[in-house]
Amino acid sequence: MATLKKLETRIETNIKKAWYENGLCMMEIQQNGLYKKDYGTFKKYIKDRWGYSEQHGYRMIDSAETYQLLDHEKLTQKDDLGELSEPVLPENERQIRPLLELETYGEKAHVWRTVIDKYDRISARVIKDEVDAFIKHPIKV
């Protein structure tokens, strides 16, 4: 059973690392115009090289950037004894997507704080619900 847990942990780490790293790479390619010589536009690069829509390419970049910003905040949860945990971050790109609907980084951080304060088990669904609630009743952050 220890081997199973070890392998599952590696898979989870690789999944998280892959989408984040790919988003950072895409960000650097886009920001530095590295696609221009062979493709002319970022849209053409995304479509011809990767088979992605332009929207998906930018979503990859936005997801990595949002993750990076949340990581910088070091938002934590309290356990049953009131002790702070390690920083709590989205586990995958699917959990980041609902946050991309928000306008500002402050709004994203606020909703993420709400999610980690309210839920022990975090899913894309509960994040989406909190984003929708915030959009219906926004507060200035």
Image (spheres, helix red, strand yellow):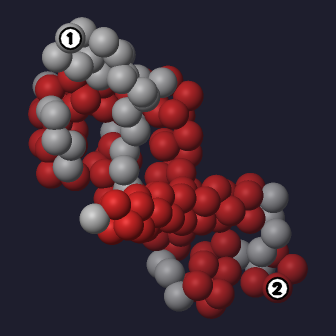
- Of badges 1 and 2, the one in the foreground is 1
In percent of width and height, residue 32 lies at: 81, 58
In percent of width and height, residue 111 lies at: 28, 30
In percent of width and height, residue 48 lies at: 62, 90
Numbered disc total: 2
In percent of width and height, residue 72 lies at: 56, 28
Which quadrant of the view contains residue 49? bottom right
How far apart are labels 1 and 2 at the CA level?
57 Å
Q: Residue at x 82, y 69 (%)?
A: 34
Which residue lies under the disc numbered 2?
38
Q: Nearer the viewer, residue 33 or 129?
A: 129
Disc 2, SS: helix
Mark 1 is surrounded, within 10 Å at the Cα level, by few (under 14), some (14 to 19) or many (20 or more) other residues, namely: few
Q: Nearer the viewer, residue 40 or 45?
A: 45
Disc 1, SS: loop
Mark 2 is surrounded, within 10 Å at the Cα level, by few (under 14), some (14 to 19) or many (20 or more) other residues, namely: few
Q: Residue at x 34, y 60 (%)?
A: 2
Q: Nearer the viewer, residue 110 or 79?
A: 79
Which residue lies under the disc numbered 1?
81
Q: Is residue 74 left or right of residue 39?
A: left
Which quadrant of the view contains residue 90? top left
Which image quarter is the C terminus in? top left
Q: Amino acid at mark 1?
A: Leu
Q: Amino acid at mark 2?
A: Asp
Which image quarter is the N terminus in? bottom left
Q: Residue at x 17, y 17 (%)?
A: 80
